[in-house]
Amino acid sequence: MNFTKHSGNYFPLLTLFILFVGVSFSVQAQEHTSVKTDVMKNYRIEPPFWWAGMKDNRLQLMVHGNNISNLTVESPSKKLKVESWQSTNNPNYLFINLSLQNTPHGTYQLHFLENKKVVNTIDYQIKSRESNSANRRGFNSADVIYLITPDRFANGDSSNDEVDSLKEKLDRQNPDGRHGGDIQGVIDNLDYIHKMGFTQLWLNPVLENDQPQYSYHGYSTTDYYRIDERYGSNRLYRELSREAKRKEIGLIKDIILNHIGSEHWWMKDLPAEDWINHNAKFSPTSHKRESLHDPHGVAEDRNGFADGWFVPTMPDLNQRNPMLANYLIQNSIWWIEYADLSGIRLDTYSYSDKKFLTDYTQRIVAEYPEFTMVGEEWSINPAIVAYWQKGKRRHDDYQSDLTSLMDFPLQDALVKGLTEKDSWSDGFQKLYATIAGDFIYANPEKLVIFPDNHDMGRIFTQLKHDVALTKMALVFFATTRGIPQFFYGTEILMDNKESDSHGVIRSDFAGGWKSDKRNAFSGSGLSNSQSEMQLFMKKLLNWRKNSPVIHTGKLTHYAPQNGVYVYFRHNQSSKVMVVLNKNKGTVVINPEKFPSMLKDEKGRVGRDIFTERKYSMNKAIEVEGMSALVLDIVKN
């Protein structure tokens, strides 16, 4: 998340907290629709249920109810042990610590007592896990991620466009308003996503964002356990995961650990006085992420970065509070287990407390050793990005189990590489130098690479609305090292030429609404260039899906010369040659200039993955101007 996305119209943060009482939720109902009931007898409990057989057999329950801090807690079952409970300065909260060691699945009672007399009883469910849940595979370099802003992709259920209990209503004419896209719209178009060649689905956050305005983007959470009803329900989100999995598409959840929305139910009755940084009063972050690594820096600058708020409507969470830290970790585990996730994308990663991030990543990996987490560290300095990745040797011995990061340095280098005039320091030289600097990363092949995302201008606009350059960018990100991610609409040349506003960048996908005159899902009404780009990308990604050498093969590149950049992906059995030519005219590639890669390829041919044309690998190869040539080298 880029802080500029929240520079729209904001309402001031409430400074008077109103006592939050009388709210009751059914544990069972929360799994499906989070409908309010009186089953919990005025107690709210999170997480709403849990699972047997987790590696960590400890579970913290956060219970909210009027003046419950003076109560004691016990379990009448010997199979479920209440280890302890904690209260805070707020009498309306109890944090109960359970031991689930050898606890089988089932429903267990928890008794709340006053003066040794039971005054309330709740039923808490411990579920059985799905088979092999702990060994789920995360996403990796064999995958291609499709990033969707769900409010702007497709409206599959118009009945949830407005919800009486939620503040912001439908306003499709407003670029920063709610447009009505939802989870059902994504489910309805999974065939399209699959046929395009995508294997992972990343949705911008879909948890409840009950803010009065500018809530569509999802980054102002108001309930960590409830899908926003304008998107659907918890049950529908899980159905999306299941339906996607049937089409061999994984689901990546966008999670925000750093902050919440100012309308989060906590803000009406804070669980503890140190729950929110700066005494729950707005104090802006410096955004100086370098302060975390500066050997000459001071604590004041580090705290000014990590503890500051993005905007008044985003209270900054204090993960140094151990109960809050545990809450956030358990919430992520809950969603991984409940929705059968294949990955997590962690928004504004470095803004959270550093020690907490160590604990967070280590506990997730302990439960799911093959799971993938990608952190957003928006810096074009590779040293800043590389610091956080698992396996990195650091100057301060910091520990992290974060699998992946968003490769902002490569995105920046690619745009400059394609738009700048080549010289000894500019143009393709910047792209080459960035890849050559991969030694700074622990695992560059695990980085998520991308031409654009929801927080920056569309790649078509960044490349000055040049179709040829856009094709070259897509080829590069589909064939170089890393895990490619593409933003919805890239395949039909969506742009933001009229504005850099995030609401415009995240415009509606053509055909997602019944009234749309164009339909990108069917191809109806698209321009020739849009249809051509869509077919181009479909062919590229489906070829990639079936090309293991691109997934795991070694990357070898040559220093660019005269506007031409050549690189190879290769393993013992396969080899692919990629030529990016940004000259306006045709260039001739002499295979003899690449002896370390082509000396043993005489008698073989390079098959153009787009046209099927074959090129002899011992003869000169003509590459058209402003184009990318991808040759799959095979026997003649």
Image (cartoon, rainbow, N blue to C red):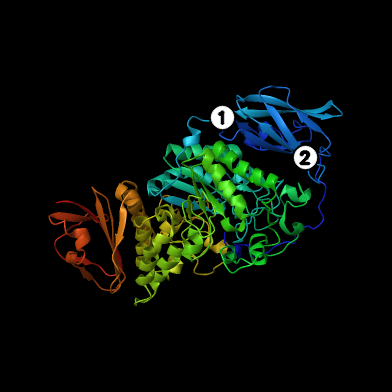
Three-letter amino acid code of the residue under disc 1 = Gly
Question: Can residue 511 be spotted in the picture?
Answer: no
Q: Which residue, as the protein is rendered here, is positioned at the far right?
A: 115
Of tags 2 and 1, the one toward the viewer is 1
Where residue 207 sits in the image (x, y, percent)?
A: 62, 47
Label 2: few (<14), some or many (≥20) within 10 Å?
A: some
Placement of the N terminus among the 4 image quadrants: bottom right
Seen from the viewer's position, the closer of residues 539 and 125 is 125
Q: Does dot 1 land on a helix, a strand or a loop?
A: loop
Where residue 455 sits in the image (x, y, percent)?
A: 54, 61
Q: How far apart are marks 2 and 1 (CA)?
A: 31 Å
Question: Where is mark 2, residue-wise?
Answer: 23
Question: Where is mark 1, residue-wise?
Answer: 53
Quadrant of the rendered structure where residue 33 is?
A: top right
Side of 168 where 14 appears, left or right: right
Q: Does dot 2 land on a helix, a strand or a loop?
A: loop
Three-letter amino acid code of the residue under disc 2 = Val
At a point 72% along the width and 52% down the height, the residue shown is 263
Which callout, 2 or 1, points at the residue further toward the start of the chain?
Answer: 2
At a point 42% along the width and 47% down the height, the residue shown is 140
